[in-house]
Image: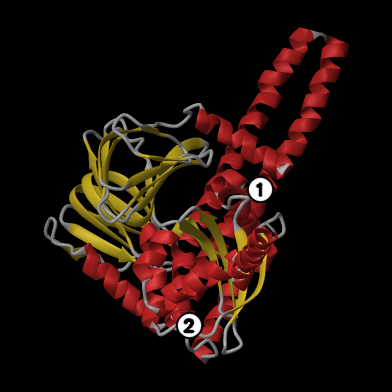
Amino acid sequence: MKRLLTLLVVALLLSSCATMKMSKDEKDLYYISDLINSGDDAYLAKMSQLPFLVDQEIIVLEKDVASFWANIIKAGFSVENPVLESGLPVDETTYLEFYDSMEVETFFKKYVPAKARLLELSTGEGQRILLVVEKKWLSRKLYAFKGPF
Amino acid sequence: MKKLLILMLMLPAATGFATPADVVYTEGDAIIRYSDGEEMEAYIGDVMDTGDTVTTGLDGFLELDRQGVVLKINPETVFTLLEREADQQKTDVLNVVLGSIKFRYDRITGNEPKIQTISCVAGVRGTEFTVFSAVDGSSLIVVDQGEVAVEAEGRTVALGGEEGVEVAPGRAPGEKFTVKRDQIDYSAWNDDKLEALLADPVGSIASLHDRLQNYIGEVDDYYALFSDLKARLDTEIEKQKQIASSQGEEAAKKYFNDTVFPLTLQAGTSGVNVRFFSLAALSLRRYISGRMYLSFKTRYIMNRSDAVYTAFLERYQALLEDFEASIVPHLVEADI
């Protein structure tokens, strides 16, 4: 019985260590970075919700979202050695991280769900990028992108 | 008071004040964004009203019937129904923001709506013509049959059948040219505009900024007029109350008909124009300058310190600040 209990405790510890290795935010971050680095603009466009925010611009046309991902990848943009700086739930002040305007504030209020998270990442080249992501079961939805800055 | 003005002006639209347009055919990706902010896939039988916008995707096509005018809205087009006041009369405005639309009139009544793009306004006396609106805000108007008067920056060009004219944003119409029916390759023309735009980032954003400042000037003028009329109206309503108590209801009614009611109409029509120019500025911001920003951001993303790009961003920032300071106060969340 004592041995069984010990095994159970060890198993629990190991499983908790496994989850501590990488947070959900980190998983989202690496997943999206991999898509950018592997040049999968089609999947990035599919993940991106409409309207989609880039910096301070609200993109409403599907074609423009697809062009955005295709063109930054074509230009050679990649996210080298990404590190998660912070992962926070979106709130009524998140829009200020993007741009202080009524349009961007309204975008977050109307189109970004409460469960979405603001991820801030830094790259090996010292740049920063913001992503607004919502994880839903086995899929992810992308609402906004800012950077690099 | 600005938000109150907007709510007052949104009410007539919601109750179908202007001539509505019925969706009579649709295929592929076609979305209607209603003036209350709700978005729905377009279906045959849907009705579009003032302030509503239709957007067609790559494979989208939509046909509208607006009491004697048929509008064939081609793929990758953004179109808004607006309303403004001119010469003491409300006029519907068919706003071709981006893409191309073919108009066909079954009859000319003399009270046709204006056709507007970012760069020009067309007065219709024709029966069949197409309006193209390019990525940089340029417009191309081509007439198959009848007459269309194209006006921009104080100059008007009258087009007859098989004639066309191009108008760059912030410029007067160019020279008219002869064109055979359906001979315009819109896609190639739009690509040329995109190429020219990318070749001159600062010039392109400067001409759009000028256009925005024109809209801001109109908004400021009409809003000042509206505020003045509203203040006078408040005073006259008080006077009407005093007349009612000192001279009776009959005298008050006469005062209302002679003084208060005409002022109410004037305030209402100047308010319509505030809303019209604010929404036109929002279209420019969303579909022309915003897309321009994306084009340059993606082009210079690996070379952000480039002098041309930083000059572009500087001018762009000025445009954003003007928009926020002068247009946003006249918008509501439903517009976003």
Tell me whether marks 1 and 2 sit on the same chain.
yes
Q: Which residue is mark 1?
A: B223
Q: Position of residue B157 (x, y in %)?
A: 31, 59
Find residue A23 and report its image quarter.
Answer: bottom right
- Badge 1 or badge 2: first in the primary sequence: 1
Position of B233 relative to A80 (above/below): above
Image mark 2: chain:
B
Position of B28 relative to B112 (above/below): below
Q: Position of residue B286 (x, y in %)?
A: 49, 59
Position of B202 relative to B211 (above/below): below
Judge by depth and name the residue closer to the eye, A74 or B312.
A74
Image mark 1: chain:
B
Residue count near mark 2 (Cα–Cα under 10 Å), binned few <14, some 14–19, many ≥20: some
Q: Which amino acid type is shown beneath numbered disc 1? A: Tyr
* Cβ atoms under marks 1 and 2 closer than 8 Å: no
In the picture, measured across the screen, residue B209 lies left or right of residue B79, that is right
Q: Residue at x 57, y 31 (%)?
A: B11
In the picture, measured across the screen, residue A12 lies left or right of residue B304, that is right
- Colouring scheme, one of rainbow, by chain, secondary structure, one colour: secondary structure
- Whether residue B137 is visible to the viewer of this picture, yes or no, is no
Residue count near mark 1 (Cα–Cα under 10 Å), binned few <14, some 14–19, many ≥20: many
Q: Residue at x 45, y 80 (%)?
A: B201
Q: Which residue is mark 2?
A: B301
Q: Position of residue B7 (x, y in %)?
A: 63, 36
**Real-space CA distance between mark 1 and mark 2, rounded to the nearest whole angstrom:** 40 Å
Find residue A7 and report its image quarter.
Answer: bottom right
Judge by depth and name the residue closer to the eye, B45 or B271.
B45
